[in-house]
Amino acid sequence: MTADAMCNDRRGDEPLAPAADQFAGLVEDLTNWAGSMPGWAPADEIARRVGAATPRLTAAVAAVSRPLVVGVIGGTGTGKSTLVNALAGRDVTLAGDLMRPTTLRPVVVAAEEASLEGVPLEAIDAEVVRTPSEALAEIVLIDCPDPDTQGRAGGDAAPGNRDRLERILPVCDVLLVVSTAQKYRSFSVAEELALFAPGRPMLFVQTHASRDADIRDDWAAELARQGYAVPNIFRIDGVEACRRGREGLPPSEGFAELTAAIRRELAGRAAARIRRGSGVELVGWLLEQAAGRLEPLEQPTAACAEAVSRETTRLEAVLAEAVTDELGRARPAWRRLVVDELEEQWEGGPFAAFLRGVSMVAGWFRRMPRSATGLVGRVLAGESPGIPAAADSRGDAERGRLDAAIGLDDAEVEQSRSILVGLAARAEIVPPRVGRARLEASADGPVAAVVGRTQAWLTAGIRRLAARRRDRTAHRGVRLLFELLFGMMLAAVVLRAGLDFFYGRLWQGNDSAGGLLTEAAIWLLLWGLALRWAAVAWACRGLEADIATVSDSLRSEDLVAPLLDDFRTAADASVAFIARRDELTTRWRELAGGEPAEEGLGRLRVGQAQVASGSG
């Protein structure tokens, strides 16, 4: 080999290693992606298809150095076995026109030293024949049974030709398709070819050249209609090729072109390239099949995910309105909390004593308190809202569990979930991945989760407000001011009472002066109540704005998420699954664009045929 040739050979090898690494990573990611969403019907179908192709993808990643296995396939009487004998340089398989079908048991033809590792000879019940033929020095031929003479066996019957054929073809790296002017439209051969063509390069050969018209153009058009790319169809006469081989004569032009194509396209580095290239093509076919399954669902899944966000926002608005109403109706409870804080913070003064006295007197006249209702009332009362077992204590039978707990009408939730059930069904997202429209209350269900989250959020908000009020009521200067104002009135009352008793009654003897004491006591009471009102008003100042702030913060807390979590999780996962397919397709296109094409080999165009599940 010349230096230039060696350089060219090295340049040809350079892209193989990085491309192999990229291909291995793509296969691994494809396999992981296909199995990442069990339970969704489209994903399960994709997983089954990828799983069926995994052995071939694994072999392509390994890119072992064994010769390529070429399966010779064709209808009965097309001269398959005769062609195999011609390529082998001697009779290695039975051929003839007297008995049909001729090939009942597959024959594996290999060079003397060729490795048959990886070829499951026992599984396909094959006969092995060794040959010194140069044409087969770097490939292994399998003379396959005819697919159009015997159907599949049923029950316990012996396997038919098509059963044998479908065990052999998964082993093949390349298909050599043989036909004649009478058989090139055979449905049985076309069916088997479509079943195993994805990811496998093909050679097409017309035989019986000496007695049949040249049908290569018509055959190429028929193959193109079926979705095959066919750069070349070879035309030979197998009988003539065998005769020339036995007599040591130069091969005919057509046979010479075929053997040259085999050496050029299937030997040496081409074998590793084909094995990887076939794997790349198979990955493309799998992704194309996945696209055919997923693309119709792309818009429904996106619509479902969008609807989840929209309905979540709507339910948050309903909950915010309900909680705001509850907070507004709970103003008396807020005032009681403020008064309790004043009594607790202000100790040791006459005004503090007056506040406690007023509360005690008010307690005598206050009716027996009924149970707090609504989430806000329960939280302010220090109770745990929980999930009401039935209608609340007011006997409102129409109110549902959520309504009774947090003021969110169950009908609103059921409406949102009903909308999502319909959209999810369009995206083939069905139970058990999502639940029903109506939620069942349970201790650990979504309803309980929403009640718990809302209670925790509201409790934290009320504690913040209470702390703010507490900081206000604990202000020492304000407390001293109110104590001073009340003390001044108290001093005035005491002074007036003293003057009235000692000066008016004892000194001047005025018996009617005692009425002024009653009047002074009334003024003291009124003054104390006015100061109490002022203190409470001062402590409650800004409470409306604080309540509005708490209500406004509800939308950012995502409190209602558990009510629609099943739909959100399923829709987001489906959208991500589809997007991942697009990412893998982009990587495949980049890798496929760098793969050198085999000029003389035909292929099934990606996405042009449906392969039965379980195909190799």
Image (cartoon, rainbow, N blue to C red):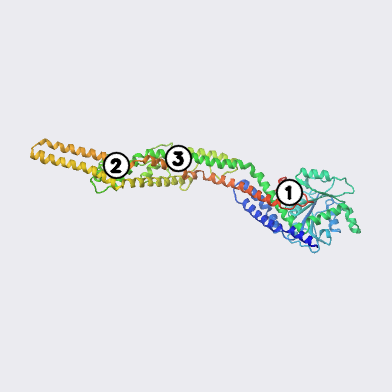
Q: Which residue is nearer to you in this view: 547 or 77?
A: 547
Q: In the rendered image of this protein, does residue 19 appear above or below residue 211? A: below
**What residue lies at 29% left-to-right and 48% top-to-bottom?**
476
* Residues at marks 3 and 1, CA–CA distance in whole angstroms: 57 Å
Q: Is residue 145 visible?
A: no
Q: Earlier in the sequence, mark 3 or mark 2?
A: 3
Q: Which residue is mark 1?
A: 195
Mark 3 / mark 1, whichever is N-terminal:
1
What element does badge 1 sit on?
helix
Tell me where residue 334 appears, x and y as whole percent: 35, 42
Query: Hey, which residue is sitting farthest front in the picture?
Result: 4
Amino acid on which the number 2 mark rests in the picture: Ala
Amino acid at the residue labelled 1? Leu
Residue marked by disc 2: 535
Q: Is residue 103 left or right of residue 524?
A: right
Nearer the viewer's eye, disc 3 or disc 1?
A: 3
Instruction: Calculate the distance from the C-alpha at mark 1 to the C-alpha at mark 2.
Output: 88 Å
Count residues near mark 1 (Cα–Cα under 10 Å), then give few for <14, some for 14-19, many for 20+.
some
Q: Is residue 389 left or right of residue 238?
A: left
The quarter of the displayed image where residue 501 is located:
top left
- Which mark is in front, 3 or 2? 2
Cα distance in 3D space between marks 3 and 2: 33 Å
Residue 257 in the image: state x and y as whole percent: 84, 53
Judged left or right of residue 529, residue 427 is right
Mark identifier at residue 319: 3
User: For the residue marked with disc 3, what is the amino acid?
Assistant: Leu
Numbered disc 3: secondary structure: helix
Q: Residue 378's image quarter?
A: top left
